Image (spheres, rainbow, N blue to C red):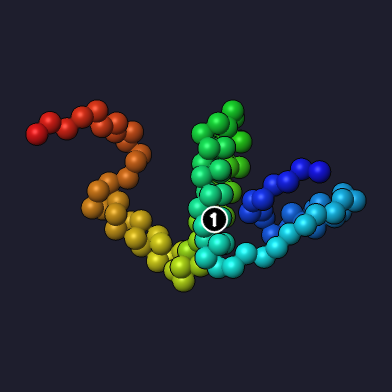
Amino acid sequence: MPIYNKLVRDLIPKVIEEKGKTCSIRVLEQGEHLEEIKVKMQEEALEFLEAASPKEAVEELADILELVHTAIQMYDVSYEQLEQIRTQKKSQRGGFSKGIYLIEVKE
């Protein structure tokens, strides 16, 4: 029996049971939950990095976005507030759309 010890989507236990299997779960405390969101975000970012097709990449981005939505909810921040912070940072420092790759900075 595989042991996972990781954060999963809310309906995964139901999906497992519908396949005639059983699973053990526990509901994380808020601090633990936030730490596991960070771990899961890294996992999903790696899966995005390793995606072999645009479809797989977009699926991983959707997972990352779901984690972002959960994290901001835990920080009591709305998506609109997050978007405001994003646009403010973009206006001050730019985005990432031009593909600028910094090599070095000399003093």
Pinpoint residue 101: horizontal percent, then vertical percent: 29, 31
The answer to which of 4 and 19 lies nearer the viewer is 4
User: Residue sitting at 57 percent across and 32 percent down?
Assistant: 51
User: Residue sitting at 76 percent across and 43 percent down?
Assistant: 2
Residue furthest to the right: 20
Q: Quadrant where the N terminus lies?
A: top right
**Horizontally, is 93 left or right of 71 in the view?**
left
Q: Quadrant where the C terminus lies?
A: top left
Q: Please tell me in which quadrant of the rendered image residue 30 appears.
A: bottom right
Pinpoint residue 21: horizontal percent, then vertical percent: 87, 50
Pinpoint residue 32: horizontal percent, then vertical percent: 55, 62
Q: Please tell me in which quadrant of the rendered image residue 14 appears.
A: bottom right
Total marks placed: 1
Please tell me whether mark 1 sits on a helix, a strand or a loop. helix
Q: Does any portion of residue 89 appear in the rendered image?
A: yes
User: Vertical placement of 64 versus 75: above or below?
Assistant: above
Residue furthest to the bottom: 76
Q: Does any portion of residue 78 appear in the rendered image?
A: no
Could you classify mark 1 by the number of other residues whose Cα lies within 10 Å: few (under 14), some (14-19), or many (20 or more)? Answer: many
Pinpoint residue 65: horizontal percent, then vertical percent: 53, 52
User: Residue sitting at 32 percent across and 45 percent down?
Assistant: 95
Residue under label 1? 37
User: Vertical placement of 47 versus 41: above or below?
Assistant: above
The answer to which of 3 and 85 lies nearer the viewer is 3
Residue furthest to the left: 107
Dot 1 amino acid type: Ile
User: Residue sitting at 50 percent across and 53 percent down?
Assistant: 38
**Horizontally, is 68 left or right of 22 in the view?**
left
